[in-house]
Amino acid sequence: MPNVSEVVKAAERHSTKDEAALEVLAGMVDKELEKNPAAREIAYLEPKYDGKTMGALDDLKALGRKILMRWNKELHALVCGDKPTDAKERQEILKALNLGEAAVIASVAAALLPMGVPAPLAAVLAPLIVKKFIWPAKDELCAAWGEAITRGK
C-alpha cells in the first residue's frame, strides 16, 4: 500500500480541478487500473485520455460518478455511522473540519485507503467527495450528506 502522505499530496494536487474534471478523471483512473493493476500503488495517476480504450468522455464521467457514489456511501457510513471500530477515523475527519478544506481532503484520502480504495482513486475521490458533499454541508454534515446521497447528487 502506498504511503498515506503520498496519497494526501496527490489529493491536494487534484483538489484544484472542478467536480466534472474529477468525475472524468475517476473514470479514466478506473479504466487504467483495469489495464494495469500494478498502478494501484501509484499515488498520483493521471492517465492520458484514449478514446479507443477508454470510451467516450461522457461514459467516463458516468463511470466516475458511479465510483464516487459507491465510495461516498461507504465514507458516509464511516463518518456518520455508529460502529465503534470506526471511531478513530470518524474523529480524525470531524476534527479536520475545524482546520479547513485541505485538512478534510487529507483526512478523507487517508480514510479511503484502508477501505480498499486504490491509491490513485483515493487521491481523486477525496477532493471530489469533500467539494461535492462534505464541505457544502459541514455545519449539518451527516444529515445533509445523507440527503445528498439519497437524491443521488
Image (cartoon, rainbow, N blue to C red):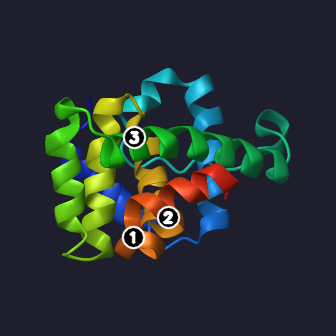
Give, as a three-letter code, the residue at label 2. Answer: Ala
On the rendered image, what quadrant is the N terminus found in? top left
- Front-most of residues 4 and 78: 78
> Neighbour class for label 1 at 10 Å: few (<14), some, many (≥20)?
few
For label 3, the residue is 77
Name the image quarter holding residue 116.
top left
The picture places residue 122, in percent across and down from the top left corner, at 41, 45
Return the mark for residue 70: none
Q: Which residue is mark 1?
A: 140
- Amino acid type at circle 1 is Glu
Q: Nearer the viewer, residue 110 or 152?
A: 152
Pointer 3 local density, CA inside 10 Å: few below 14, some 14–19, many at least 20: some
Mark 1 touches mark 2? (CB < 8 Å): yes
Evaluate if marks 3 and 1 touch, with contact meaning CB atoms under 8 Å apart.
no
Quadrant assignment, res 86: top left
Q: Say which element carries label 3.
A: helix
* Whole-percent x, y for residue 46 in the image: 53, 51
Query: Where residue 2 sits: x, y (%)?
Result: 26, 36
Residue drawn at (51%, 53%) of the image: 146
* Labels 2 and 3: the sequence-earlier one: 3
In the rendering, at what x and y percent does residue 120 appear?
44, 43
Q: Which amino acid, mark 3? A: Ala
Q: Is 128 left, or right, of 34 in this rendering?
A: left
**Circle 2: element type:** helix
Residue wearing tag 2:
144
| Residue positioned 76% across, 38% down in the render | 54
92 on left or right of 65: left
